[in-house]
Amino acid sequence: MDDDVLALVRRSVPRLSAAEARVAETILGDPTLVVDLAINDLAQLCHTSLSTVARFAQSLGFSGYRELRVAVARTVTLAQAQRARFGLDTTAIDPDDEPSAIAAKLAAQEIDAIEKTARGLDADALDRVARAVVAARHVDLFGQAASSLTAQDLQQKLARIGCSVAHSADPHLALTTASLRTADDVVIAFSHGGETQEVVRAVEIARDAGALSVAITSAPDSTLALAADIALITYAQESPFRMAAMSSRIAQLALVDILFVRVVQHRGEPVVIPLQLTHDAAASRRRR
């Protein structure tokens, strides 16, 4: 079960009935209500029936309202602890915040994104991807805008250990390279929302060509996640004052680091030499 049940509720809204959506929106508006209210009180507040609230809980994968309530309480407690760590009442950024407040709020949000991504990691799926990367003839990385930066980071890491890897921010070139992939190749695509059309199309083309396709996204029900063979999920929520993909990028980078370390572990001793060579090459350039 998702460690951040509020993220799970948020993702469920598009597929809910109108009555169930009211329950979801009420919970997202004030999660403490679920902690404090019995099922009949929440149903009355949402102008719906007990059975609707129970159905809503079950649609999220819980056995019933009681289990949902426990999960929400855990998430609320974790969020409160995160704010307390930085001495904050809220992590929402206000237009009048001073630099110190902005720094504290961003730190709290980004640490939260990393922790939730790490806790929610599907270790078996990540290990499957790491082994596939090690065995691959070639790895293509797809990502647009801010997700392109994460793709570039993984490209640099894999190149340092001798992997054949490429990334292009040009969507047309991505489609071209995707069409040339085979069963010996791996493609990894990055998209926070999982609906970037150019990235989805590149994954579909590469998958149909036979390559193992991997999605790194925060939306497990997105078009990208459903199009890929394997989906690795990040946990991050952006706010209106963080339009530059801050928390989502941090969560992606954390997942990339975990994946890279696992690739290095599976490669074993042979990676020591390329890592040392690339380190020495960069060091000698700095000395000139």
Image: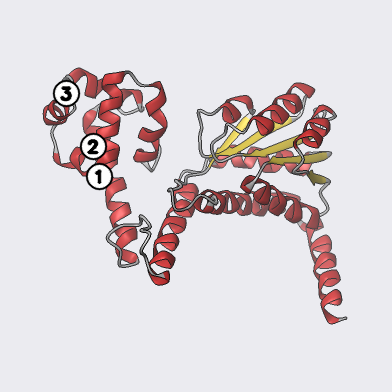
Disc 1: which residue: 73
Q: Is residue 227 left or right of residue 167?
A: left
Q: Residue at x 35, y 28 (%)?
A: 60
- The amino acid on which the numbered mark 2 sits, given as a three-letter code, is Arg
As helix, strand or loop, the secondary structure at mark 2 comes to helix
Are the residues tagged 2 and 1 within 8 Å (C-beta)?
yes
For marks 3 and 1, give the CA distance: 23 Å
Q: Circle 3 sits on which residue?
A: 47
The CA distance from mark 2 to mark 1 is: 6 Å
Instruction: Determine crowd level at label 2: few under 14, some 14-19, many 20+ residues with C-alpha closer than 10 A.
Output: many
Asked whether residue 63 appears in the rendered view, the answer is no
Point out residue 79 in the picture as x, y percentages from the top left corner: 32, 53
Amino acid at pointer 1: Ala
Tell me the element at label 1.
Answer: helix
> Mark 3 is on which residue type?
His
Q: Depth check: 52 or 183 in front?
A: 52
Total count of labels = 3
Closest to the observer, 271 or 253: 253
Would you name the residue on which mark 2 appears?
A: 69
The N terminus - image quarter: top left
